[in-house]
Image (cartoon, rainbow, N blue to C red):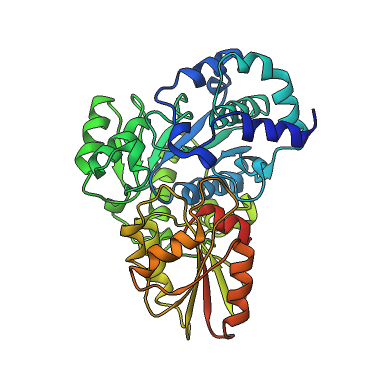
Amino acid sequence: MTYEQALDYLYKQLPMYQNEGKSAYKKDLNNTKALCNILDNPQQKFKSIHIAGTNGKGSSAHMLASVFQEAGYKTGLYTSPHLKDFKERIRINGETISNTTVLNFIERYISDFDKIKPSFFEWTVALAFQIFAKEKVDIAIIETGLGGRLDSTNVINPELCLITNIGFDHVEMLGDTLEAIAREKAGIIKRNTPVVISQQSKQKEVFEQIALQNNAPIHFAEELNTNCDLKTDLVGSYQKSNILGVLQCWAILRLQGWQISFKQLQTGLLNVTTNTKIRGRWEILSHNPTVIADTAHNKEGLCIALNQLGKTNAKHLHFVIGFVNDKNLDDILELFPKNATYYFCQANVQRALNAEDLKRLAKKYKLTGESYESVSAALNEAKEKANSDDVIYVGGSTFVVAEAI
């Protein structure tokens, strides 16, 4: 088996949320627990921080990883989805694991795992945990994939839990009210384990209730009695809440005995991109015209992104956008400005919404433009039409951003 064949096995033979959506979502943790048992429970062999949330959990995970790296700790980082390369999901000190590591793992455990029929995500979590244990990382920053309570990562016993914010996303699986979604995210809260809430929300009572049930000290970062002037190299006004969450985590980690100075916190936040190789968070792809790619893909995230976009000095805005086919676009498309030019496209994934269908739906909201069969065709046309002082925004879906960069 080659590396490419191994990836093909993961992508095509197993349920994968990236392609199949709701049908890939498992309703319990039995598969993950079974896989961990086969691997001699690697999740018990390294320390971790667990992160959930609707928006901001990826950025926060990379921030924390960068801070730990600056403090000299061997740091594992597990995030999803990847943008260009499967191996982006599993990093140690910012470096992805090797093709050989992935291949050897699949070849070694394919016969044992096949008896359990795990999903793509369960396979990947098992791989990450095995690598972090084998490499003896000092700490692993673990981002949930979807939700929290039933997420495959939710078999760890972390030093600390972080919940970034709550918004409407994946409602068909997590619930159609913010309270229901908050309860799912709060499912990562562990007994006697501190939990940080980055962004204040109306679901505060939900978090307090579940924290109380677990005797878990709870901290609301926005209630920090401090004038936070910390900066990060991750561009985007929405990073302010993420920085507050990381600051609160740092304070707790210091009390737990982790040797991380305030200077290392500052430096870590300022060097996230260099240390962790994160992509797609308000990333400037080129200039004249300015091309911005951002992975915001739900109402709350896009609302913040579009608000920031409106503060740019763009003479005219161009939008290269595409979505997956299970989004409620009525709530999303109404956010976009009508006095802009649109290039409707579809990423090369099974769940991508047809570009022509998107164009027809967008017309209801007076968003006008043409449809394109690919992201590259749409982006090239936007660059062709835009003037040097215009801004082109690429987004709507993580998969659109992945193809753009």
Against 361, residue 108 (above or below) is above
Relative to 304, 95 lies left or right: right
Q: Looking at the picture, how far across and down is residue 118, in whole percent?
A: 55, 23
Against 214, residue 360 (above or below) is below
Measuring 54% from the left and 27% from the top, which residue is drawn there?
Answer: 119
Residue 259 in view in this figure: no
Which sits in the foreground, 199 or 166?
A: 166
Measuring 48% from the left and 30% from the top, which residue is drawn there?
Answer: 153
In this rendering, the count of numbered labels is 0
Residue 245 in view in this figure: yes
Measuring 44% from the left and 55% from the top, which residue is drawn there?
Answer: 297
Q: Looking at the picture, how far across and down is residue 140, in whole percent?
A: 55, 35
Name the outermost residue toward the right.
2
Q: Looking at the picture, how far across and down is residue 225, in whole percent?
A: 28, 54
> Where the N terminus falls, by quadrant?
top right
Could you say which quadrant of the image residue 283 lies in?
bottom right
Could you say which quadrant of the image residue 99 lies in?
top right
Measuring 27% from the left and 26% from the top, which residue is drawn there?
Answer: 215
Against 237, residue 50 (above or below) is above
Which sits in the foreground, 379 or 197?
A: 379
Relative to 54, 95 lies left or right: right
Q: Looking at the picture, how far across and down is residue 21, in whole percent?
A: 46, 39
> Where the C terminus falls, by quadrant?
bottom right
Could you say which quadrant of the image residue 404 lies in?
bottom right
